[in-house]
Image (cartoon, rainbow, N blue to C red):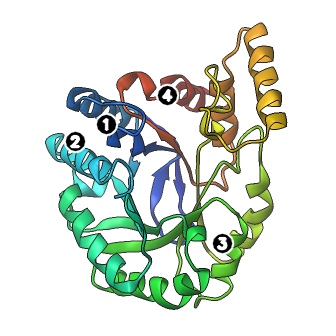
Amino acid sequence: MAALERRELGSTGLMLSCLGFGASPLGNVFGHVSHADALAAVRLALQLGINFFDTSPYYGGTVSETVLGNCLHELNVPREDIVVSTKCGRYVDGFDFSAERVTRSIDESLARLKLDYVDILHCHDIEFGSLDQIVNETIPALQQIKAAGKARFIGITGLPLGIFTYVLDRVPPGSVDVVLSYCHYSVNDSALVDLLPYLKSKGVGVISASPLAMGLLTDNGPPEWHPASSELKSACRAAVAHCKKKGKNISKISLQYSLMNEEISTVLVGMNSPKQVPRSSLHFLLYH
């Protein structure tokens, strides 16, 4: 195992590799992934010191969970060596944050992952439901799941940063252990920084995802459906061109920027083959 930096996740006591394995691509959401490629990607990630793996039943309609579970099982990874998170509430057929559905969801996820428990169970993209339902029904149900030993810690995820303060200000202290924010800590958007003192005061750990802004900060650019404004897309294209002119890769620079704030415990990056496991950025962290 490489000496990749580990950071504590809030008050959980979990020590996460500062780079996390985002398993959504294992659900074939960006094209078919062979079992051999998936297995090789997970193996290489472990060899490089990545110990955090994140998935969801929404990714590929449960395929991501199944593939990740099969890979970890086939590699015979000791359970205590990895931190695994999955989600509930968002599915290919829509959103359902009811206590009944999330309670059933964790059992389904554990079966696919071939695990007895997950380290973190997130309520997935809560802005698409009623935040009051999340506070009054979903979080209490997740606490019951935690009490049953099926999840060690509870998290919430979403895009608008205001959802985190809304929920955390209304649930009992300690009810939510982690937040997962995406697209708000990268070279084009660092709004998450303003929320970090508040989250720290609550004892809540912070996970960041989409450091490449869902494709904006890549040579190939974002997909057509990307919701960014034309002005932002244009600015990012100009940044890509500037980096190329300097002989640099904007994706590597962007990932390194996102990894350098130690108040963010880990940064999730989607990986589906050994080529996508970002070794260059890991080397940067190991030797700088």
Mark 3 sits on what residue? 164
Q: Determine which quarter of the picture holds residue 189.
A: top right
| Callout 3 touching callout 2 (CB < 8 Å) | no
Q: Report which residue position mark 1 lands on.
A: 42
Residue 278, disc: 4
Residue 71 got which mark? 2
Disc 4 to disc 2, C-alpha distance: 19 Å
The mark that comes first in sequence, 1 or 3, is 1
Q: Which amino acid, by three-letter code, is at mark 1?
A: Val
Identify whether 76 is placed above or below 264. Answer: above
Which residue is found at the position 28% from the left and 27% from the top? 37
Q: Is residue 107 rendered to the left or right of residue 226?
A: left
Where does the image place residue 152, in percent across and percent down from the top left? 37, 73
Instruction: Report which quarter residue 258 is drawn in.
Output: top right
Q: Is residue 104 left or right of residue 93?
A: left
Chain-order first, disc 3 or disc 2: 2
Residue 18 visible here: yes
Which residue is drawn at the image coordinates 78% and 54% (left, top)?
191
Q: Is residue 15 above or below residue 70?
A: below
Question: CA separation, marks 3 and 4?
Answer: 29 Å
Q: Say whether disc 1 or disc 4 marks the residue closer to the N-terminus.
A: 1
Of circles 3 and 4, which is in front? 3
SS class of the residue under badge 4? loop
Spatial CA span between label 1 and label 3: 31 Å
Which amino acid type corresponds to the residue marked 3 in the rendered image? Phe
Determine the CA span between mark 2 and mark 1.
7 Å
Dot 4 alpha-carbon crowd within 10 angstroms: few under 14, some 14 to 19, many 20 or more: some
Quarter of the rendering occupied by the C terminus: top right
Q: Could you say whether the residue bearing mark 3 is in a helix, strand or loop?
A: helix
Q: Relative to 280, is 125 above or below?
A: below
